[in-house]
Structures are given as structure tokens and as C-alpha cells.
Amino acid sequence: MDYSNVVIAISLLLALSTSVNGQVIGFPIQSPAPAPAPGPQYTNLTELLSLAGPFHTFLNYLVSTKVIDTFQEQANNTEEGITLFVPKDSAFSKLKKPSLLNLTTDQLKSLCLFHALPHYYSLADFKNLSEISPVNTFAGGALYSLNFTDVSGTVHLTSGWANTKVSSAVHVTYPVAVYQVDKVLLPEAIFGTDIPPTPVVDIAPTADSPASKNVAAASPDSMSPSSSHRMMSSWAILNHLFLAIAGGFLIFL
């Protein structure tokens, strides 16, 4: 082996790493590549709705119509994210008319889609939504839109048939926002635009109320025939008594 060549090679390497004009020249050291940014947190919607609150009725509808799969796909495989409005179990039990029992499978699916927006919205975003309402829901179409109003930080929703508000924030972490509402959202596309008016509460006293009885007792026209007869008899007796006294006085004169 030619040791002279080895010595020459080592000498050249040392020469490259020595200082030239007062500056040290060495082999460049590459900095490590930055770690990739963590992706959005995966959220299992079925597990979330099962544990977060009394949402069993709504979850059962989502599972039976397979809308839960659509929501899960939107939540974890898109950049838009999703916003859900989830009615409590008591909201379904209070819903008497219109009923959900006569809905077709497609209508029930649209009803479930109507409770979601195809975008992630935090609580602060609803103020902007109130300015651009109505907002199309996951069901799509003008008759499947929601109106939002922000009243001193409280978010109100109107679907035509139902007026409700966001009562609590269940889960607000991108890409999933879940808000609890107190009523079932009923779209006009399913239940029509002939919305019954809100019943007006009649505050006038009823016929059987104590107030009406007092008024009737105080009114002369409300006296019974027997009471009127007794009063007339009393006046007749007093009249005869007065005439008798007056007649006796004239005889003594």
C-alpha cells in the first residue's frame, strides 16, 4: 500500500478545514428538518354524542339514516370542518305537532342534515353569520336554510317552524363544533311554509274565575230572580207599614 498517497489525502483534508484569511472553512453542517405540523384532532362523533349529553334520540336518527358517516367524513377528511346543532332528548319528547313518525326515510335523512353546517364555526363566528343570514345547511337549498341572530352573545336560530337558541357549547375544537339546542329544527322543505301562528295567551278572566264571579256579583243585572223578588217584597211591606202609620196619625188629628 502506498502510504504516501494516504498522507497526501489527509493533508488535503486538513488544508480544507484550516483557516483561510482568518476564516475557518469546514464542511457545512445541515440542520435537521423541522417536524411536520400536527394535523387536526380526530373526533369520533358517535362517541362524542354518546358521552357528552342526553343526545341519544338524535344520535339514533343519525345512525339509522347513516348521516353520521357523512358528518364523520366531513369532520376528519376536509379542511372545512363541520358545525352540529344537537337537540336534547327532551326536545324530541316535547315535539307533538308536527310529528316525525310519518316522515319517509329521505325526509328523515334531510332532517338530520338540516342540523349541520358544512363548515367549522366558533362562537365568535356567529356574529358574522347573523349578518349574512340565511345560511344554507348541510341539506342544501333555500328551504333548508337557517337564520342566525346574535343577541348580547347569545346565538338564536330560526328555521321557520322552530325558534331556539344555543344553550351550551358541547365541543368547540377545530374541525368539529357541537352546540346544544333546546328544540328540534324543522325545515320548511319538509313541513311546508304554512306555519301555524304562535297562539296568543288570553289574559281575560274566564267565566269560572274568581274575578268574573266578583264582577257578576257586583253587577245589578246579574242578580238572580229570587233575590229580586225578596227585595220587592221587602219594599212592599215597608210601604204598607208607612201607610198604616200615616193613617193612624190622621185619625188622632
Image: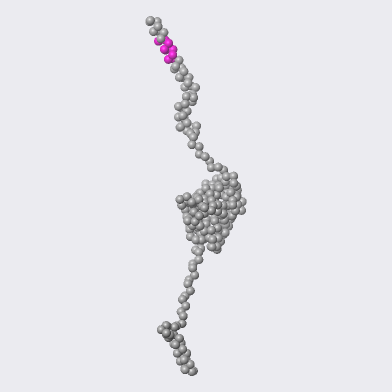
Q: Which residues are magenta?
A: 237-245
Residue 189, image x, y percentages: 60, 50
Residue 101 visible in the current orientation: no
Image quadrant containing the C terminus: top left
Q: Residue at x 52, y 58 (%)?
A: 120
Image coords of residue 79 (percent x, y): 54, 62
- Near-viewer residue (14 or 23): 23
The number of numbered discs placed on residues in the rendered structure image is 0
Which residue is the extreme one toward the front?
21
Residue 93 in picture, x, y percent from top left: 52, 48
Q: Residue at x 49, y 35 (%)?
A: 204
Magenta span contains residue 243? yes
Is 105 placed left or right of 22 in the picture? right
Q: Taking the image as drawn, is residue 30 in sight?
A: yes
Does the segment drawn in magenta span residue 68? Answer: no
Q: Residue at x 47, y 31 (%)?
A: 212
Q: Is residue 105 above or below residue 213?
A: below
Q: Nearer the viewer, residue 87 or 220?
A: 220
Magenta portion: prevailing SS class: helix
The image's colour scheme reads one colour
Looking at the picture, does residue 26 appear above or below residue 151? Answer: below
Q: Position of residue 44 (x, y in %)?
A: 51, 61
